[in-house]
Image (cartoon, rainbow, N blue to C red):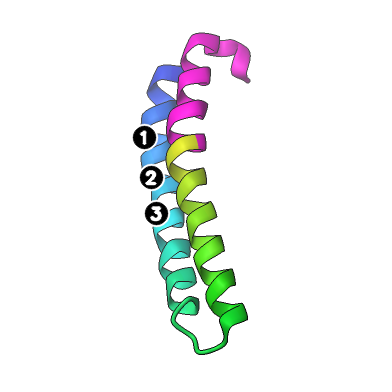
C-alpha cells in the first residue's frame, strides 16, 4: 500500500504546488523594493529546498521502510 502511494502522491501534489509557489515568489523577487526581492528569493529558495530535499528525498526514504506503520 505504501509503495503505491509514495511516488504518485509526491509527483502529483508536491511537485505541482511547489512549481506554482516558486513561480509566484520568483515574480515577487523582480519587484523594485529590496525588501520584496529578499522575501521573494528567500521564499522561492525555501520552497525549492522543501520540495526537493525534504519531501522528495527524506519523506519517501522514510515512508518506504516504515510500510503500514506510517499510517
Main SS of the magenta part reads: helix
What is the secondary structure assignment of the residue under circle 2? helix
Which sits earlier in the primary sequence, circle 1 or circle 3? Answer: 1
Q: Is residue 35 left or right of residue 10?
A: right
Foreground label between 1 and 3 = 3
Which residue: 42% across, 41% down?
52
- Is the residue under label 2 in contact with that under label 3 (CB below 8 Å)? yes
Alpha carbon separation for disc pair 3 and 2: 6 Å
Give the number of the disc on residue 8. 1
- Is the residue under label 3 in contact with that under label 1 (CB below 8 Å)? no
The residue that disc 3 covers is: 16
Quarter of the rendering occupied by the C terminus: top right
Q: Residue furthest front?
A: 34
Alpha carbon separation for disc pair 1 and 3: 12 Å
Q: Is residue 46 magenta?
A: no
Q: Is residue 53 above or below residue 21?
A: above
What is the secondary structure assignment of the residue under circle 3? helix
Q: Is residue 21 above or below residue 61?
A: below
Query: Where does the image place residue 64, in percent across and percent down from the top left?
Result: 46, 15
Q: Is residue 31 above or below residue 17?
A: below
**Range of residues picked out in magenta:** 54-71
Q: Is residue 66 magenta?
A: yes
The residue that disc 2 covers is: 12
Which residue: 60% across, 18% down?
70
Q: Based on the displayed image, in which of its 4 quarters is residue 7 positioned?
A: top left
What is the secondary structure assignment of the residue under circle 1? helix
Q: Is residue 61 above or below residue 51?
A: above
Q: Mark 2: few, some, or many residues within 10 Å (few <14, many ≥20)?
A: few
Query: Where does the image place residue 57, in percent across and percent down from the top left?
Result: 44, 29
Query: Where does the image place residue 66, in percent across and percent down from the top left?
Result: 55, 11
Q: Is residue 45 left or right of residue 8?
A: right
Amino acid at each position: 500500500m505504501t509503495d503505491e502511494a509514495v511516488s504518485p502522491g509526491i509527483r502529483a501534489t508536491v511537485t505541482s504546488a511547489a512549481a506554482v509557489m516558486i513561480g509566484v515568489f520568483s515574480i515577487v523577487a523582480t519587484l523594485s523594493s529590496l525588501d520584496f526581492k529578499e522575501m521573494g528569493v528567500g521564499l522561492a529558495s525555501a520552497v525549492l529546498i522543501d520540495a526537493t530535499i525534504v519531501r522528495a528525498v527524506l519523506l519517501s526514504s522514510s515512508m518506504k521502510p516504515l510500510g503500514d506503520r506510517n499510517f
